[in-house]
Amino acid sequence: MGMLSEFKAFIARGSVVDLAVAVVIGGAFGKIVTAIVDGFVMPVVSLVTGGVSVADWKYVVTPATLDATGKQVAAEVAIKYGLLFQAAIDFLLIAFVIFLFLKAYNRLREPEAAAATPEDTLLLREIRDALKSR
């Protein structure tokens, strides 16, 4: 079997197509959640923190260096932990919404039918009940 035909067989599998659709939808969903976080959640957090944007939180290792004219000679070196905090909030919200979606999906699924009791078990129960009644 040639590589091209193997590749066609690989792509034609349903699971690969399902995975591709999931990745595309997940990417779009991530953008929606990021917009919600940037537009609604982070402004509320900024109000709580005194108007400072979470994305601007940083630890300055070395401040920027300016010359006599006020022109920047060396850029500041900073650890921007606010961006990590914002990404963590994005992740938690995406995970929570996926959890809620799966919970609703599982609730909508029809429960599986209970397996029928085997005939020999029913007969044994009848014998047991008959022996108890004597």
Image: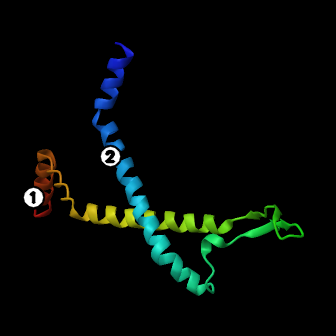
Q: Residues within 10 Å of mark 2 (few under 14, many from 20)?
A: few
Percent position (x, y) of residue 30?
43, 59
Name which residue type carries label 2: Val
Count of numbered tags: 2
Quadrant of residue 55 within the rendered picture: bottom right
Circle nearer the N terminus (1, 2):
2
- Which quadrant of the rendered structure holds the N terminus? top left
In the image, farthest residue toward the top: 1
Identify the residue shown where x is 14% and y is 51%: 116
In terms of depth relative to the viewer, which is nearer, 107 or 22? Answer: 22
Identify the residue shown where x is 79% and y is 64%: 76
- Which quadrant of the rendered structure holds the C terminus? bottom left
Is residue 11 placed above or below 71 in the rendered structure?
A: above
Label drawn at residue 17:
none
Answer left or right for 127 relative to 72. Answer: left
Percent position (x, y) of residue 87?
56, 64
Tell me the element at label 1.
helix
Percent position (x, y) of residue 16?
34, 37
To which residue does mark 2 refer? 21
Answer left or right for 122 relative to 7. Answer: left
Quadrant of residue 11 within the rendered picture: top left
Label drawn at residue 130:
1
Identify the residue shown where x is 33% and y is 61%: 102
In terms of depth relative to the viewer, which is nearer, 79 or 100? Answer: 79
Name which residue type carries label 1: Ala
Identify the residue shown where x is 73% and y is 64%: 79
Q: Residues within 10 Å of mark 1 (few under 14, many from 20)?
A: few
